Amino acid sequence: MDSPKPTIGIRGVVLLCIAVVIFSELLGLPILRRAIVPAPPPGNLVAAASAPSLVAWNEATIVLSSTGNPQRGEFISRRCESCHGVEGFSSQASTPNLAGIDAQYLWKQLQDFRTGKRKSVLMQQIAGALTSRDAADVAAYYALLPNAPDAQFNPSFPQTLHDQSAIDNAQRLLAVGDPKRGIPPCQACHGPLGYVRAAPSLASQNSDYVLRQLNDFAQGVRTNDVNLPMRTIAAELLPNERQAVAEFYGADLARFPVGYISQ
Amino acid sequence: MRMGNFRAYLIVAIFSLVYGTLRFSSTLQAAHVFDRRNRIDLATLHLQGEFIESNLGAVRAADGSVTIHMIAEKYIFAPACVTVPVGVPIRLRITSADSAHGFKIAGVEVKTLPGSITERHLRFPAAGKYEFYCDEFCGPGHHAMMGRIVAVPESQFQPQKSDRGAACGQP
């Protein structure tokens, strides 16, 4: 057997590796410290006049818009009933249903009406009379209403399909969109497959209303979608595709994710 | 186990090479992401700073350089279609409004994180439509998240022409 000579051994290897780790961490510190410099001012491009919306989703607005008082909102909703219906289902197909709507979405729309970022002669006046807290309360109330319509009292929803052959077209757009044209599936943001902040659920929305909003987005009449998502997508959709999608939603066919087995 | 000095030094050398490389690159990335010069408040992207709506798209500075400002968000790129001149160095400044997004265009890898501005330098060698798809999984609409950059001859380039929909890239 060979004579014992001094070796590093496993313990030495571990110690050397620890030394390497400490050395690397110390070496990285000045690089990270260099990053900690005062932030520059946000720049001289302040766009309140041309901004799509004045709502910024910071902690205060998220808390305010999602913690409204539905009991107080019920009293405020008396002003909405004549058009949007007692149960949140409108009697006219051109007026949106509000039952079960996302509270943050409704709050943002009321804010946009108040600040004139979404145009409507009637709604700008009505929303202008509300405070930001009132808007949160009424949004909380409508978010609680069941979005299943009572057929006896809600003649305009669901509507019958004018064009049965459009169902395939609409199902394709809801389920997969059109990747070659950059159209994401509707149900990825408008539910029930997925949601993003301040995108409304369209499962129980009137078709005439959906169609008018799509046309307004496409033509740049409605511009309160922050960072252009709906203006981009609606402009990409052909007129018959907008019609098909709107009728599909208006016929109450999007209650479950399209492409999934519902029952 | 008996271990010779050579083998011990080899283990330490391999460890320090692997660890050092990973640590160095991640430190550089962290330095970029946390660099306050690259930070931007994603709640107020549309209200202040360089990503306001009127500033999105390609602009040409006085010195002839072209800058693209773009926002990646679920599930589109805003603007979805940008026209740029061929053969000119282009600065792409991009940020995300929600989650991590990324794509590859003209041989350049672009990754973007919410709250952080990524800058890349591009050059388009030939005229044509360059399409790119998001390659960071970002949700159920990820597969259809697509943007286009249309390179046109210098004479046809109009800065910040808004081409949405089928008008994308039409002269």
Image (cartoon, rainbow, N blue to C red):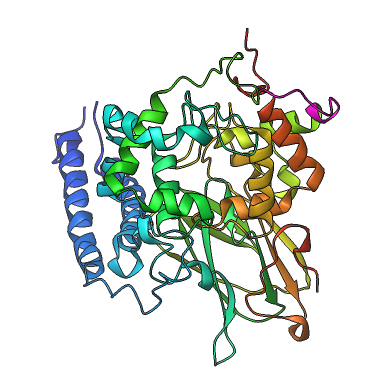
* Magenta portion: prevailing SS class: loop
User: Which quadrant of the structure image shows residue B77?
Assistant: bottom right
Picture residue at 47% right of the left edge, 59% below the top: A117
A181 relative to B120 in the view: left or right: right
User: B69 or A214: nearer the eye?
Assistant: A214
Q: Which residues are magenta?
A: A158-167
Magenta region includes residue A165:
yes
User: Which quadrant of the structure image shows residue A25?
Assistant: bottom left
A18 relative to B14 in the view: left or right: left
Picture mark count: 0
User: B146 or B86: nearer the eye?
Assistant: B146
Q: Position of residue A217 (x, y in %)?
A: 63, 53
Magenta region includes residue B34:
no
Query: Is B67 located above or below residue A156 in the figure?
Result: below
A170 relative to A225 in the view: left or right: right
Query: Is B73 located above or below residue B124 in the figure?
Result: above
Query: Is A259 located above or below residue A13 in the figure?
Result: above
Q: Position of residue B158 (x, y in %)?
A: 69, 80
Picture residue at 79% right of the left edge, 47% below the top: A239
Q: Position of residue B155 (x, y in %)?
A: 77, 86
